[in-house]
Image (cartoon, rainbow, N blue to C red):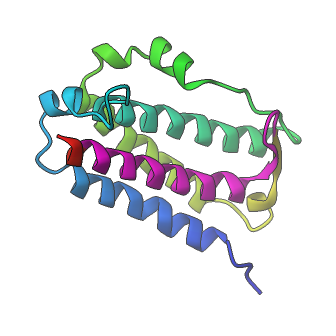
Amino acid sequence: MKQLLNDAKALRTLRKTPVILKAVLAGITPEQARTLRDGADGWSILFIVCHLRDVELMFSGRVRDMLEKTNPEFKVVTNEDMIQQNDYEGASFERALFDYYDHRTAFITLLESLSDEQWLLPGTHPLQGPATVLDVAVNTGLHDIDHIEQIIRCVNAG
């Protein structure tokens, strides 16, 4: 019997959120991506897309670590670190979006190749505790939804 949260549901969500993101961003120009924010001190759409791109790599890296190592401890990276290291201010909106979609496709391909046992392999986040490959996949989809909603707030604020 499959559990309530399972690999099929995780993969469905991971396939759907880029489609939703494309719909939300339809018609957004690179200039709007730089200027529309979710409040005076909020992130721009560009920053959000860069963040989605970078977190996609982080989450897929955690899964690869769980597949290659025994119960690895995940590295903690702050949003501020990602912003500085990956120059969100100077980033290309189109490139960041393309890279996000490309990284998501690769992540889904990796997850589709896993056995039932591999979905349950563990890792540990130093602040959040233990997680399985399934947990990371589900969390990736939830993370997408949080930031897609944030983009909608940016668009509505503009």
Q: Give the image location of residue 63, x and y in percent.
A: 68, 45
Is residue 149 within the magenta segment?
yes
Which residue shows up at 11% across the image and 47% down it?
Answer: 27
Tally the numbered discs: 0
The C terminus lies in quadrant: top left
Q: Is residue 70 left or right of residue 158?
A: right
Instruction: Give coordinates of residue 51: x percent, y percent.
Output: 44, 32
Which image quarter: residue 125?
top right
Outermost residue to the bottom: 1
Q: Residue 77: x percent and y percent?
A: 64, 24
- The answer to whether residue 109 is visible is no
Q: Which residues are magenta?
A: 125-154
Decide whether residue 32 is among the magenta residues: no
Q: Is residue 88 visible?
A: yes
Magenta: main secondary structure: helix
**Depicted 154 relative to depicted 13: above or below:** above
- Give how far across and how far down residue 54 sits, in percent: 48, 31
Question: Is the residue 74 above or below the residue 123 in the image?
Answer: above
| Residue sitting at the far front | 40
Which quadrant of the figure has residue 1?
bottom right
In the depicted view, which residue is nearer to us: 127 or 69? 127
Asked whether 119 or 135 is in front, the reply is 135
Q: Quadrant of residue 134?
A: bottom right
What residue is drawn where x is 59% and y is 73%? 8
> What residue is at 22 percent from the left and 58 percent from the top?
23
The residue located at (88%, 41%) in the rendering is: 70
